[in-house]
Amino acid sequence: MPPPERSWRSARPSCTALSPWPSPALRGFAGSGFPSARALEKNAFRLIQANARLYNRLVDELNAGHAELAGHREILTKWADEDRRARLGQRAEIIRERLAIGGLLARLRRTLFQLERVHFRLVRLMAYHDRGIGRGTLDGGVTTAQFFERFARERRDVEQKLSLTRSVSKMYLRRNEGKLP
């Protein structure tokens, strides 16, 4: 079946104009999505404030989870060694280790999911802030400049912890028949 004919005269093509077979799902998406640059500039301070609150809460959760994960370092080291040798331990050991790490990993993955999105938005908002848009004072008397300085300092550590969470998830998957906790 040939694709339906399209009109190329539209001054502003929508998502459906780009697809040879228009989909109702795409039609609904055409006007939604990420805020425009103008909307970001207009609401920059409010967005920074909301995302800074979320970031602070999620980084605290991530740090607490990784402090707890450090208590299971021997299991993680054993798993990494087994993965390097392409072998798994005995079934009873694996079950005991999965039980020890499963609940913690589930919490860390929920935090990871939310924090990745907040982190992405803050990186984008930091670019606006560096141009002088969205400056102000956040909760607790911290200025946006102070917050972004701290965000930049913590960025590498946070990204390493997110990466470690992903790699522990992969090791867990290998020991749990491809299922996450």
Image (spheres, rainbow, N blue to C red):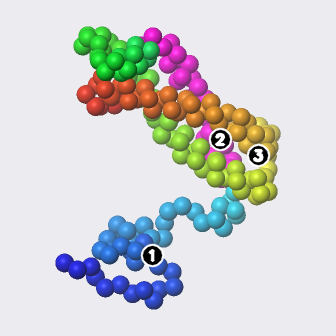
Q: Residue at x 34, y 66 (%)?
A: 25
Extreme residue toward the front, this view: 85
Disc assigned to residue 1: none
Helix, strand or loop for the magenta stretch, by majority: helix
Tell me: 172 left or right of 10: left
Q: Position of residue 125 (x, y in %)?
A: 67, 52
Between marks 1 and 3 in the image, the one whose residue lies nearer the viewer: 1
First-in-chain label (2 vs 1): 1
Identify the magenta region: 46-75
First-in-chain label (1 vs 3): 1
Q: Position of residue 118 (x, y in %)?
A: 58, 45
**Which element type, helix, strand or loop, lies under badge 2?**
helix
Q: Position of residue 12 (x, y in %)?
A: 51, 80
Extreme residue toward the left, this view: 1
Q: Is residue 88 above or below residue 35?
A: above
Image quarter of residue 29: bottom left
**Measured Cα–Cα span from mark 2 to mark 1:** 35 Å
Disc assigned to residue 14: 1
**Measured Cα–Cα span from mark 1 to mark 3:** 36 Å
**Measured Cα–Cα span from mark 2 to mark 3:** 12 Å
Residue designated by label 3: 144
Amino acid marked by disc 1: Ser
Q: Residue at x 46, y 35 (%)?
A: 110
Amino acid marked by disc 3: Thr
Residue designated by label 2: 53
Between marks 2 and 1 in the image, the one whose residue lies nearer the viewer: 1
Image quarter of residue 90: top left
Q: Position of residue 79 (x, y in %)?
A: 38, 17
Q: Residue at x 53, y 46 (%)?
A: 117
Q: Which image quarter is the C terminus in?
A: top left
Q: Is residue 94 magenta?
A: no
